[in-house]
Image (cartoon, helix red, strand yellow):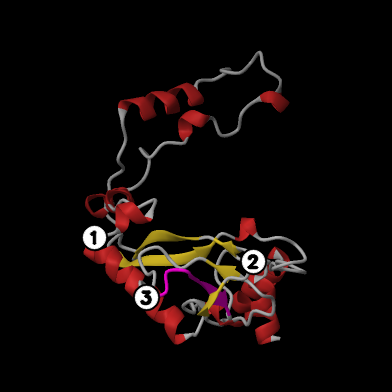
Amino acid sequence: MGEESRIPLVTTPKARMANKVLKTPNNNSGVQRSTQIKYPVQRLTYDGFVAHYYAYMVKVIHEVEPTCFEQAVRNPKWDNAMDEEMATLDANVTWELVALLEDNKAIGCKWVYEVKHNADGFVSRYKARLVAKGYAQTYGIDYEETYSPIVKMTIVRTIIAMAATKGWSLHQMDIKNVFLHGDLQEEVYMEQPQGYVDQTHLNLVCRLKKVLYGLKQTLRAWLDKIG
């Protein structure tokens, strides 16, 4: 690759000065080797990134995600995202509206917003997710056993090594709202989602039939479903 075709680095005088200090001989001559900092904090800047990645970061930072429903409401892109989420939950028959008995309690829920980006930094989609406030659940009442299995890095490295050795192609995919297909065994009641309260049944709550993100038993219910 010729010099004229290389992507230029975006640097600043401050970054160049930090690099100059780091390259000075005997800079840490009076400090023991075990106490030297291998990656000083002054190296952790955006200045050394190539131009196209710097442009990517600018695009990502430009899109501000709402932190609450009040910030997102009446914005068409987030209204559409919430409508899409509610349509998915409706099609999945996630809950039914019932009257809350005196012995039961209803946990809350909230909207969480995220901007999905493509590899070039442009917006792929606006995602709104309804999350249950699982921290308000009570053990023995609306949840029992919970567990969260993880993949060991040894397995991941083994698969990558096998693929590299045998010339296999590796692919990944994202299943939309995959956890929401888990069946809920416990009796869990939740308040109606903000912005989507049934005006003809204001006093009713949602009795969950399927799990939602945020519930303590979400992972267990999903693994029971596929197991």
Mark 1 crowdedness (10 Å alpha carbons): few <14, some 14-19, many ≥20:
few
Task: Name the residue beneath numbered marker 3.
Answer: 200
- Residue 219, given in percent of the width and then of the height, sits at 65, 72
- Residue 4, given in percent of the width and then of the height, sits at 22, 51
- Residue 57, given in percent of the width and then of the height, sits at 33, 50
Say whether residue 141 is magenta.
no
Marks 3, 1: nearer the viewer: 3
177 sits left or right of 225 in the view: left
- Residue 199, given in percent of the width and then of the height, sits at 35, 71
Cα distance in 3D space between marks 1 and 2: 38 Å
Which mark, by number, is residue 102? 2
- The residue type indicated by label 2 comes to Glu
In the rendered structure, which disc, 1 or 2, sits on the residue that comes first in sequence? 1
- The residue type indicated by label 1 comes to Asn
Q: In the image, which residues are magenta? A: 200-208
Say whether residue 203 is magenta.
yes
Q: Residue at x 36, y 56 (%)?
A: 69
Which quadrant of the structure image shows residue 82? Answer: bottom left
Whether residue 65 can be seen here: no
Secondary structure under the numbered disc 2 in the rendered image: loop
Task: Name the residue beneath numbered marker 1.
Answer: 75
Outermost residue toward the top? 30
In the rendered structure, which disc, 2 or 3, sits on the residue that comes first in sequence? 2
The N terminus, quarter of image? bottom left
- The residue type indicated by label 3 comes to Thr
The C terminus, quarter of image? bottom right
Total marks in image: 3
Q: Considering depth in this image, is 7 or 178 the residue closer to the camera? A: 178
Residue 69 drawn above or below residue 83:
above
